Amino acid sequence: MHRKSLIILLVMIPIFCLNVGHVHALSPSQVKAGIWIISIDKVDLAAGTFSADFYLWFHYKDTPPNFEFINGAPSRIEKTAEREGYVEYRVKATFVQQYNFKSFPFDVQNLNIIIEDKSLNMSKLVFVPDYEESGLDPQAYVVGWQFKDFMAESVVHEYPGENYSRIIFTISIQREIFPVFMKNFVPITLITLISLLSFAVSIQNYSQRISIGITTLFSAVAYHLATLSTLPPLSYLTLFDRIMLAIYSLFLFNIGVSVQGMRLVDRKQVERAIVFEDRMQKLLPIVIIVLLIFFTIIIEPFT
């Protein structure tokens, strides 16, 4: 009986070893990838691109990955270090990025650097982020922007019939709040206040009042178009668009009050015109609040 068991054991050991070797052969090789961002040279919103200068490295077991940048092309790639199981590159490249401007000018943009192996699918190679060493250089900066966050993740990208491992490095940037406020909102606020000064003009001088309203309206439209000229053509409304729609509606209210006052004055109903204008002035703060809430909050899901 013992002899029989020994024979079975001797037969099973080679089979078990072959199966273990087969499973090991099928397991994908893990490549640890890291990045150190030296600088973001240019964020071109109109073109939908950005340029970056960075170090890129891989820790591997067998052979270094034959990688490529999915969303960009390097203008310079230089191997700076290499030893067994490790390779490092210095890269300068321009990447294509789909920006989201719904919150413009308070938008936060994600700059993605996407890497994938050229030939090995997920059954043979899987990228793993090097969280410990990756990051942003403390002296890195982007003019007009400030860094908000840095992230790295490994994802699966599906192609017809096979899947590939990708690693995505993401740099989140946001606009500097004070310059945004001074450049984008102070001028249009002044234009709006000038328009509302028409309420200080006597209702009997309605021609001057209407002239002020129309002139400031044209100024607001010109400013709106000039501000959006830095952005690509969009199929949706930005936050700035919605605020401008509220301002246009306020101008319409202002001009409408002047026109109605003009009609009453022409009918020799000056007292009635004065009472009407006084009511509209008292209603003005409520109109401003309602317009801002409507255009910035209520219609946002539909834009």
Image (spheres, grey):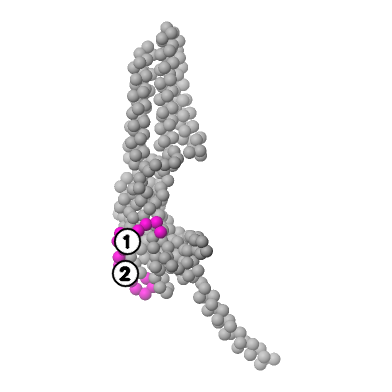
Residues rendered magenta in the picture: 70-86
Alpha carbons under labels 1 and 2: distance apart: 13 Å
Question: Residue 285 occupies which quadrant of the picture?
Answer: top left
Viewer-closest of 193 and 23: 23
Tell me which secondary structure the magenta stretch mostly adopts: strand
Q: Is residue 79 magenta?
A: yes
Does residue 89 lie above or below 254 as drawn?
below
Residue 95: image x %, image y %? Answer: 36, 55
Q: Secondary structure at mark 2?
A: strand
Q: Secondary structure at mark 1?
A: strand
Residue 41: image x %, image y %? Answer: 30, 52
Instruction: Say whether residue 97 is visible.
Output: yes
Task: Tell whether label 2 touches label 1 (CB within 8 Å).
Answer: no
Does residue 173 lie above or below 155 as drawn?
above
> Disc 1 residue type?
Val
Q: Which mark is residue 81?
A: 2
Mark 2: give few (<14), some (14-19) or many (20+) Cα within 10 Å. Answer: few
Does residue 57 appear to the left or right of 295 in the view shown?
left
Residue 45: image x %, image y %? Answer: 36, 46
Does residue 115 lie above or below 227 as drawn?
below
Q: Residue at x 39, y 65 (%)?
A: 67
Mark 1: give few (<14), some (14-19) or many (20+) Cα within 10 Å. Answer: many
> Disc 2 residue type?
Ala
Q: Residue beneath label 1, please?
A: 91
Q: Is residue 78 magenta?
A: yes
| Extreme-front residue of the structure | 160
| Extreme-bottom residue of the structure | 3
Question: Residue 242 occupies which quadrant of the picture?
Answer: top left
Q: Residue at x 43, y 30 (%)?
A: 246
* Total numbered labels: 2
Q: Residue at x 32, y 61 (%)?
A: 91
